[in-house]
Amino acid sequence: MDLPTPAEIMSLRVKGRGFWKWTIVCIVLVSAVFAWQGIYSSQSGQGFRERKKSADSKVRILREIGTSFDSAEFRKDLQKIESYYADLNSAAKVGSSQEKADSLALLERTLPESMKRWSEFAENSSDKLLQYVAKESRFLKMESEDSHPLTVKEEERANDYFRMAREEWLSGNKFRRDGNHLYALVLYKRSLKYSLSSLKVSKLPYPEEYRNAANRLVK
């Protein structure tokens, strides 16, 4: 048996080093692919959670406004949104990534128009209540203390509530003009609450159309 020559030994060493070099390169590439998939999956999951959190906030405020007023249109609108929202929550628990994405996209397409329409309603509703409170407060000041007694502290609280209601309404108008209907609705809701609180402190009756809102917003 002939022994390998030095040149042949060197050739085998070079080939061996080449084999291990490519093996290491392949391992690094495969590891990078798995790492990227993990990062992408994590980012996708985080993106879904953030978008769902935003949808949660919008559905919550629509639910609070919609159930505070007796409106057939709002009830129908809210039923559709609640149905899409239930599908989203179900997909978030047991659905595939595609089912999660589809259910979230459907709700996101539905919400903007409802937010815009409801913020317009809330702006008009809170403005109407502000005018009612202002009118009733003027009549109250014209009455004698015997017929409608208020302490100085109660009068100050009623005035403070009215001032805060008007400030929230004005801020809501600004956000609505800027297209931020979510925060506009939040501010209009506060305006309604403060106006109703002013009426309560002043021992004045709530308008009939605001009784549901008063039951939900004023403790």
Image: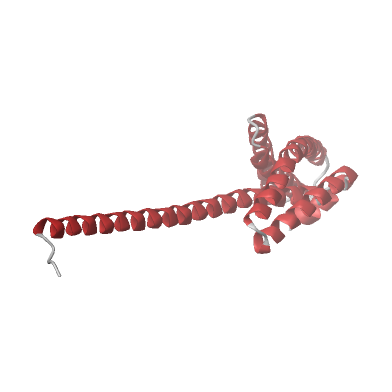
> How many numbered badges does the structure rendering display?
0
Q: 37 left or right of 75?
A: left
Q: 34 left or right of 178?
A: left
Q: Nearer the viewer, residue 107 or 189?
A: 107
Picture coordinates of residue 22 (x, y %)? 30, 54
Q: Residue at x 37, y 53 (%)?
A: 29
Q: Which image quadrant: the N terminus?
A: bottom left
- Going by the picture, which residue comes out furthest to the front? 1
Q: Nearer the viewer, residue 34 or 205?
A: 34
Quadrant assignment, res 100:
bottom right
Q: 23 left or right of 8?
A: right
- Going by the picture, which residue comes out furthest to the left? 6
Picture coordinates of residue 61 (x, y %)? 71, 49
Picture coordinates of residue 114 (x, y %)? 76, 40
Quadrant assignment, res 209:
top right
Q: Which image quadrant: the C terminus?
A: bottom right
Q: 29 left or right of 76?
A: left
Q: Residue at x 42, y 56 (%)?
A: 35
> Is residue 21 in view from this perspective?
yes
Q: Residue at x 69, y 37 (%)?
A: 169
